[in-house]
Amino acid sequence: MKISEEQLALVNSRIDAMVKAGSFYGKKLKEAGITRVETAEDFEKLPFSEKNDLRDAYPLGLMTAPEEEIVRIHSSSGTTGVPVIIPYTAKDVDDWAIMFARCYEMAGITKKDRIQITPGYGLWTAGIGFQLGAEKLGAMVIPMGPGNTEKQLKMMQDLESTVICATSSYALLLGEEIEKRGIKDNVKLKKGVIGSERWGKTMREKIHDMLGIELFDIYGLTEIYGPGIGINCPGSDYMHYWDDYLYLEIVDPKTGEVLPDGEWGEIVITTLVKEGAPLIRYRTHDLSRIIPGKCSCGSCFPRIDVIRGRTDDMMKIHGVNVFPAQIEEALREFPELSSEYQIRLSHLDGKDTMRIYVETNGHVDFEDISRRIAASVKSKIGFTPIVKVVEEGVLPRSEKKTKRVIDERYEE
Ligand code: ZN
């Protein structure tokens, strides 16, 4: 989806503000001699912004509105040390609340709901975002914050919470505790809004089964307001996002080239009306794709697919970008397989090959199943891998994150 005239006008107003304020991106544009963009093609030539730019701007180099208009800051910790500080004006805070309230509405949550919020409050954008949106909607908020499961369950029952906002792992833990205590009948939860983590289908099904609630995936990142910039609609995994506030592009993570709708790549976000810290073409490193066409739910807001990991997980083979999630999707069609798998890329006889190791028990025809898996993977990625079936328990397991992709092509 190309950027519209209306969106371009908003981008130009943000460019003006950033150049005037001399914020990091304003300086970047000034150096490049850019003060306006006239066309979608111009827009696609604008430089990207990166998390490192934001770190370099620490503490307040991103501030684009006058100081007297800034009402708060949020911060994303990051793993590398230097935090990123995002200043917000009152309008930014209100815009965020409007977007988040839309998320709740998309999930069918109303002002009659009682929303129990378990993500943390403080410097980061989680708890407070869930709260802002719920108040904008007009629902009753039960602002628990994280931990203290005993108290969470007591409030959940006494106040008859109907919506739980949590990370997937905490929702799972609550579900297990409810089951263990045999208090499911006292729990009135109907919906769960799950954010800030990537989670698999299996986990989703488990939480759904345990709590008997409808689950929604909320998208967002601190650099771009926080959670609440997109959510899936009932009956679909695809997430709608708010294109009156944000412009999304999908780019090839290696070349930065903009990809057509439907192709997988990195989400790049431009904020259209943000005042405190506008961002132009911000690289999220999240992998997804834009879903073409209109949703059957009737909403006109555009959609992206479920976040399928980070750009660092991507493999390039035979000139095609491949993501572990695509392989996973193909493997899920085979109930005979365990959840473990390993992908090995190597350079044999002058060409790149992909070998996929999967596990199963001894009761299946290894040759037959490997042929069927290879065909299924080919239908997803466009070329045929070599599939090796091994006995269950053979592949390495790790307590932490198991390494799924081993690239041996560039090793001696
Ligand atoms: Zn929809």
Image: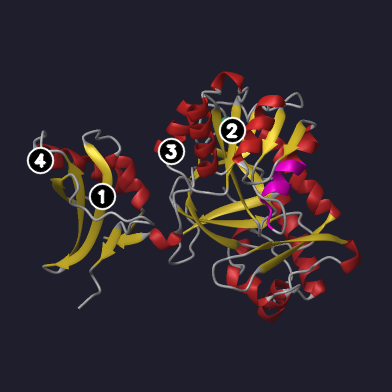
Q: Residues within 10 Å of mark 4 (few under 14, many from 20)?
A: some
Q: Residues within 10 Å of mark 1 (few under 14, many from 20)?
A: many
Q: What range of the chain is rendered magenta?
A: 124-132
Q: Is mark 2 within 8 Å of ligand 1?
A: no
Q: In this figure, which residue is indicated by the disc labeled 2?
A: 192
Q: Secondary structure at mark 3?
A: helix
CA–CA distance between discs 2 and 3?
13 Å
Q: Nearer the viewer, residue 12 or 342?
A: 342
Q: In this figure, which residue is indicated by the disc labeled 4?
A: 366
| Placement of 4 over or under 331, stated as above or below | below
Q: In this figure, which residue is indicated by the disc labeled 1?
A: 341
Residue under the point 30% across and 48% down = 381
Residue under the point 79% across and 51% down = 93
Q: Nearer the viewer, residue 333 or 297?
A: 333
Q: Secondary structure at mark 1?
A: strand
- The quarter of the picture where the C terminus appears is bottom left
Q: In this figure, which residue is indicated by the disc labeled 3?
A: 203
